[in-house]
């Protein structure tokens, strides 16, 4: 009898394996205009099928259509097995019971391989993972190397004790201010400034750049929107006040053009590219545009990581990685296997060899450590370094998905940007500006 049972058990395992190997999954992904990116994912799908027998059907959907298509598919009960996107769909739809909780996948891959702050972007409550970080759009702080040389400063990255690569002239936010003062000059001698040390946007027309700047400084200084355990609004804190005090001080110091209070989403790029300002935060598009239009000028641009708090050493950078969301379907187990395959270090390195390190960069620390990433260009390497410090609008985590929705609304609703206008154009005190943020957040919560 026991032999029969064992045989049946083995037969069942074999049948299960055959069923898994014979299955296929449907993966939705935002369409990229860069063919090499799509080629890299197609390669991974083919390698996965060759290894497991599981066919991956990659469906590419334009960004502007994907959310509507997903909502309709969920309503019809015909959603994909896995989704690759960058706007937190797992958190948005998990309350409908259609999203698979994926903490076990993170554990299998190795939790220590992910930057902790990046993981918490997609948890509610903390520890309960709804999405898996995959890649990140490259971004960082740009500067002119020759300006630093002229000021007697080292323009090249160095390695800190913790292994981070950073340009010492911009290591902390205090360094940013002091270096910017040294670079702000009257070159023509006519009594007017024509070279400014920095350029950050101070109004809501920045379309995300001003919010990214403000939020990065707030979180680096230790400010939080919500208490990660209770969900209480805690933005009105000494840490947030100190952040806005710094942002007011750097504005008032005269190291930026007065016009930053009216800059739109492209002005920081424009003023940097015409060499009016010497330090900006932006995506890698600055590098790619200059390389295309003036390759020799591109060699003068350096990239560094998020500046740290001068006392605590904390670094944060406002970013939004692409993630994998796994849905509850008949193919959930196969979708998890494909997700784990995409997270393998050798898979990712091969994908980056195909797509290049120009648009996306890795998020996993063990992938960053691969020799391949020590051989890429210095600018790309520094963009990759900056991926270690990504945080989202809900940082450092919240107890419920509903509060994540509010955190996103605060970030995208120009609340942090408006406070920049208050402290610069309206000359509000940082305390009053932060109180205004708190007031607006509380109003949002009451409206829900």
Image (cartoon, grey):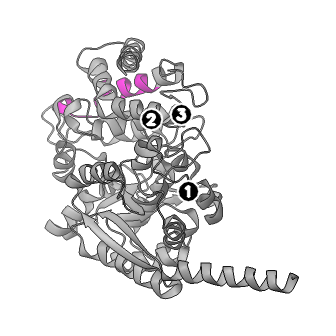
* Number of numbered discs overlaid on the protein picture: 3
| Mark nearer the N terminus (1 vs 2) | 1
- Residue at 41%, 64% (x, y): give it: 361
Determine whether, in the image, residue 431 is placed left or right of residue 31: right
Quarter holding the C terminus? top left
Magenta segment boundaries in residue numbering: 243-259
Residue 367 or 77: which is nearer the viewer? 77
Q: Is residue 389 above or below residue 25?
A: above
Helix, strand or loop at label 1? It is: loop
Determine whether, in the image, residue 90 is placed left or right of residue 75: right
Determine whether, in the image, residue 249 is placed left or right of residue 388: left
Which labelled disc corresponds to residue 398? Answer: 3
| Mark nearer the N terminus (2 vs 3) | 3
Q: Residues within 10 Å of mark 3 (few under 14, many from 20)?
A: many
**Taking the image as drawn, is residue 181 in sight?**
no
Quarter-of-image position of residue 127: top right
- Assess whether mark 3 and mark 1 are in contact (beta carbons under 8 angstroms): no
Residue 153 position, x and y percent, is 42, 52
Q: Is residue 254 magenta?
A: yes
- Residue at 39%, 60% (x, y): give it: 83
Disc 2 marks which residue? 404
Q: Residues within 10 Å of mark 2 (few under 14, many from 20)?
A: many
Q: CA distance from mark 2 to mark 3?
A: 7 Å
Quarter holding the N terminus? bottom right
Disc 1 marks which residue? 164
Mark 1, mark 2: which one is toward the viewer? 2
């Amino acid at each position: 009898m026991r032999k029969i049972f064992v045989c049946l058990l083995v037969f069942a395992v074999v049948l299960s394996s055959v069923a898994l190997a014979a299955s296929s999954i449907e993966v939705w992904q935002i369409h990229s205009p860069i063919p090499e990116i799509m080629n890299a994912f197609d390669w991974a799908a083919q390698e996965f099928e060759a290894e497991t027998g599981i066919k991956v059907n990659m469906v590419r959907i334009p960004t502007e259509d994907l959310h509507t298509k997903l909502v309709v598919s969920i309503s019809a009960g015909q959603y994909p097995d896995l989704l690759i996107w960058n706007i937190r769909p797992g958190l948005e739809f998990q309350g409908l019971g259609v999203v698979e909780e994926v903490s076990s996948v993170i554990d299998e891959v190795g939790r220590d391989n992910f930057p902790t702050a990046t993981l918490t972007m997609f948890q509610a409550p903390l520890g309960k993972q709804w999405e898996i970080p995959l890649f990140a759009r490259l971004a960082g702080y740009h500067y002119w190397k020759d300006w630093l040389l002229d000021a007697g400063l080292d323009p090249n990255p160095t390695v800190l004790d913790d292994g981070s690569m950073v340009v010492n002239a911009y290591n902390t936010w205090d360094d940013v201010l002091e270096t910017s003062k040294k670079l702000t000059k009257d070159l023509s001698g006519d009594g007017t400034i024509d070279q400014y040390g920095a350029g950050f946007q101070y109004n809501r027309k920045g379309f995300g750049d001003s919010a990214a700047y403000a939020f990065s400084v707030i979180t680096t200084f230790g400010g939080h929107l919500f208490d990660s355990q209770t969900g209480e609004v805690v933005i009105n804190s000494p840490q947030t006040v100190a952040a806005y005090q710094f942002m007011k001080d750097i504005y008032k110091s005269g190291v930026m053009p007065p016009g930053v209070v009216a800059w739109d989403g492209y002005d920081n790029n424009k003023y940097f590219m015409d060499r009016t300002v010497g330090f900006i935060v932006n995506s890698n598009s600055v590098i790619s545009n200059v390389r295309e239009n003036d390759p020799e000028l591109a060699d003068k641009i350096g990239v560094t990581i998020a500046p740290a708090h001068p006392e605590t050493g904390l670094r944060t950078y406002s970013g939004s990685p692409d993630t994998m969301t796994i849905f509850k379907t008949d193919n959930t187990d196969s979708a998890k296997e494909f997700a784990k395959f995409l997270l393998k270090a050798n898979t990712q390195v091969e994908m980056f060899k195909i797509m290049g390190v120009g648009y996306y960069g890795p998020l996993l620390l063990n992938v960053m450590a691969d020799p391949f990433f020590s051989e890429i260009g210095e600018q790309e390497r520094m963009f990759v370094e900056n991926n270690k410090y990504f945080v989202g609008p809900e940082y450092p985590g919240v107890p419920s998905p509903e509060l994540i929705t509010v955190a996103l609304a605060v970030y995208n609703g120009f609340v942090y940007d408006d406070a920049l206008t208050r402290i610069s154009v309206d000359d509000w005190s940082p305390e009053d500006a932060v109180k205004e943020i708190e007031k607006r957040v509380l109003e949002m919560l009451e409206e829900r």
